[in-house]
Image (cartoon, coloured by chain):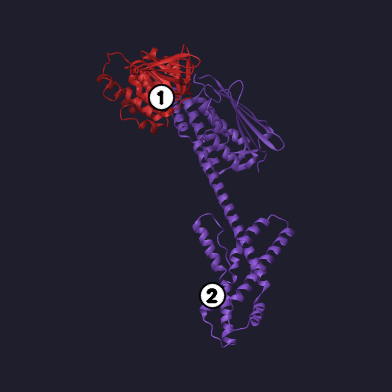
């Protein structure tokens, strides 16, 4: 027996759910109709029309149409309980529902006997003979199992959906990260700087082309990685930052990363978008110097990265842009709730971005 | 190359990157008809110095820290606006939407031929008079339309640049080519004609009640009729402003919303 879809709220699916129950619970009645028909043909000469036989047998299991939702609801309610509570609850419920059905069956058979020309005594004898309390237990068990099976399948579908959504998010985050790195503004402004240096300072132009090449290579290499060591990540960041420093000579940077944390794992291309934010939003309009400080420290369980700058800081009405949101969702997809990203004003001026991730040794 | 006996074209270069400014410097070095009067690294610097430099042409980067190229244009008075050539790394989609010829744009790294063409157009236009290709007024109207109502005004103060958030403005009074912006703290002079500024503000919030007055409707406490259909507007801070009967429709707009 296959269970219908669980009752949902739309009226049409509600109707089809009840209709399906009707069909299902007509099946056992139909079987007994066939059985009665054969029996009567073999054992009596009495003529019973198929129609009247159908009317008298098909509805015999219909009370279970009302019983089914009760069993399903009870099954869901008892699922989280102890085994003893579950067993007792279901036994009591099966006894009550089974007894109710048998009672109804007795009444039905008394008033609508299969053959009228028997005396009441014979009808009662036949009735007792046709009651099967054990069948009630089986019916209850089948409904319960089918509903459990259906729920499990739905949970699995949901979990599968969640999983694929998560994967999609990760893929989108990855593509966005890539677009951040290969920002057209970054690329064309860098090329513009090179085109100027070609004339004024050919050695500088050559160095800048090499820097850009290193950055592009680093970007391409990091595309199929989720994580790399902090040392590699800082190398990539330095390449990027050196290019930025040519475009904005007012920038400077200090990196304080103890050697014992350099081999810890960090998400790939984590630092560059943060530094990009500093350049895009943190530069004062008068080309005043801006210093970036990058610090890493680790405890037994956590690695904490701090990037702060002494630029213009968070202005009123500030809200997180694409870059930070993107970093946030990447951290979440990699570490779940174990990662923390916070953005705060730095005193006397500037901004501090702090990231905490679980400590993981490169493997 | 033809002799240019007329005054050289005064050029202003605006870009937040020193090498990008240098790129245009390199291209302009070979053009004796052009004179670079200043290089700016931000829109704020332009607002501070524009009246002093009086440029004929401005090369303008779009993405800059602080205010971007569009916001800079939005804060200039049409009377002060030079010809504009946008120089951009990747904002061509934003610029291309401008009416043809109203504004030109160049992509970084700048192609020398295209640079010559753009400059040639500016020089031609200069000889033919400014009206032919859609004057600065039309450029500013498009910037305005693109940006929606202005949220802050960038005001050149005494030796510094002040940002005035638009909601803080209580009322505005025309003063020749300038307007006076009245806020709770102070009154500042802003270089833009009242009629032009009016178009940049949210018409539901800022009502023109007189030829020379705009009032922030959120500051209004009372309205009372005076002689001959004129009216007076009383603000929460006690200021009393005179409203002209010619601007009654503005008042009506407000009353419709109140009642």
For the residues carrying marks 1 and 2, which lies nearer the camera in this image? Answer: 2
Above or below residue B221? Residue A46 is below
Label 1 neighbourhood size at 10 Å, few (<14), some (14-19), many (20+)?
some
Q: Residue at x 41, y 26 (%)?
A: B255
Disc 2: host chain: A
Of residues B227 and B58, the one drawn nearer to the viewer in this rendering: B227
Which residue is labeled 2 in the image?
A55
Q: Quadrant of residue A256?
A: top right
- Please state the total of marks drawn on the protein image: 2
Chain A: drawing colour: purple
On the picture, is B46 further left or further right than A160?
left
Label 2 neighbourhood size at 10 Å, few (<14), some (14-19), many (20+)?
some
Q: Is residue B61 visible?
A: no
Q: Which mark is residue A195?
A: none
Which residue lies most toward the right here? A84
On the picture, is A169 further left or further right than B235?
right
Chain B: drawing colour: red
On the picture, is B128 further left or further right than B81?
left
Quarter of the image with the N terminus of chain A is bottom right
Q: Residue at x 35, y 22 (%)?
A: B248
Q: Which mark is residue B201?
A: 1
Quarter of the image with the C terminus of chain A is top right
Residue B199 coordinates in the image, percent (x, y): 37, 24
Which residue lies most toward the bottom here? A45
Above or below residue A359? Residue B50 is above
Disc 1: host chain: B
Of residues B91 and A134, the one drawn nearer to the viewer in this rendering: A134
Q: Residue at x 50, y 24 (%)?
A: A248
């Amino acid at each position: 027996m296959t269970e219908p879809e669980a009752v949902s709220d739309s009226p049409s699916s509600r109707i089809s759910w009840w209709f399906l129950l009707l069909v299902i619970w007509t099946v056992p009645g139909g079987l007994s109709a066939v059985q009665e028909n054969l029996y009567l043909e073999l054992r009596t000469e009495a003529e019973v029309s198929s129609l009247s036989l159908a009317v008298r047998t098909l509805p015999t299991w219909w009370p279970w149409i009302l019983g089914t939702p009760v069993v399903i609801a009870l099954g869901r309610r008892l699922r989280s309980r102890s085994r003893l509570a579950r067993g007792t609850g279901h036994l009591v419920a099966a006894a009550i529902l089974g007894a109710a059905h048998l009672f109804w069956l007795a009444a039905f058979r008394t008033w609508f006997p299969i053959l009228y020309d028997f005396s009441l005594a014979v009808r009662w004898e036949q009735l007792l003979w046709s009651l099967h309390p054990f069948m009630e237990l089986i019916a209850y068990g089948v409904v319960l199992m089918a509903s459990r099976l259906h729920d499990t399948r739905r949970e699995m579908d949901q979990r599968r959906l969640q999983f694929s959504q998560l994967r999609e998010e990760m893929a989108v985050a990855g593509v966005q990260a890539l677009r951040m790195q290969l920002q057209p503004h970054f690329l064309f402004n860098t090329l513009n700087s090179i085109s100027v240096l070609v004339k004024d300072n050919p050695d500088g132009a050559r160095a800048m082309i090499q820097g850009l090449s290193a950055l592009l290579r680093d970007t391409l290499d990091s595309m199929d990685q989720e994580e790399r060591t902090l040392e590699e990540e800082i190398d990539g960041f330095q390449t990027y930052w050196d290019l930025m420093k040519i475009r904005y000579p007012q920038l400077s940077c200090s990196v304080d990363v103890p050697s014992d944390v350099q081999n810890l794992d960090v998400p790939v291309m984590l630092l560059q978008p943060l530094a990009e934010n500093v350049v895009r939003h943190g530069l004062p309009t008068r080309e005043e110097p801006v210093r970036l400080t990058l610090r890493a420290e680790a405890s037994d369980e956590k690695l904490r990265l701090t990037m702060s700058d002494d630029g213009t800081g968070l202005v009123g009405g500030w809200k997180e842009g694409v870059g930070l949101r993107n970093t946030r969702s990447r951290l979440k997809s990699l570490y779940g709730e174990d990662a923390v990203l916070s953005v705060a004003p730095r005193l006397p001026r500037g901004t501090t971005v702090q990231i905490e991730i679980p400590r993981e040794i490169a493997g | 190359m033809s002799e240019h006996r007329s005054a050289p074209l005064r050029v202003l270069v605006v870009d937040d990157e020193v090498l990008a400014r240098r790129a245009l410097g390199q291209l302009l070095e070979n053009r004796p008809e052009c004179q670079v009067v200043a290089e700016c690294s931000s829109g704020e610097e332009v607002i501070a110095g524009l009246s002093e430099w009086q440029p004929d042409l401005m090369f303008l980067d779009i993405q800059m820290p602080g205010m971007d190229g569009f916001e800079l244009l939005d804060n200039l008075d049409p009377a002060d606006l030079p010809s504009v050539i946008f120089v951009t790394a990747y904002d061509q989609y934003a610029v291309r939407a401008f009416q043809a010829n109203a504004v030109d744009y160049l992509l970084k790294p700048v192609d020398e031929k295209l640079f010559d063409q753009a400059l040639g157009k500016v020089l031609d236009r200069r000889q033919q008079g400014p009206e032919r290709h859609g004057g600065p007024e039309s450029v500013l109207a498009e910037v305005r339309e693109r940006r929606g109502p202005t949220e802050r005004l960038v005001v050149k103060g005494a030796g510094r640049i002040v940002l005035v958030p638009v909601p803080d403005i209580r009322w505005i009074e025309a003063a020749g080519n300038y307007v006076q912006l009245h806020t709770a703290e102070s009154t500042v002079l802003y270089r833009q004609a009242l009629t032009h500024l009016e178009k940049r503000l949210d018409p539901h919030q800022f009502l023109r009640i007189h030829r020379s007055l705009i009032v922030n409707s959120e500051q209004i406490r009372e309205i009372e009729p005076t002689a001959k259909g004129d009216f007076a507007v009383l603000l929460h801070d006690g200021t009393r402003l005179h409203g002209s009967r010619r601007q009654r429709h503005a008042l009506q707009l407000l009353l419709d919303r109140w009642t």
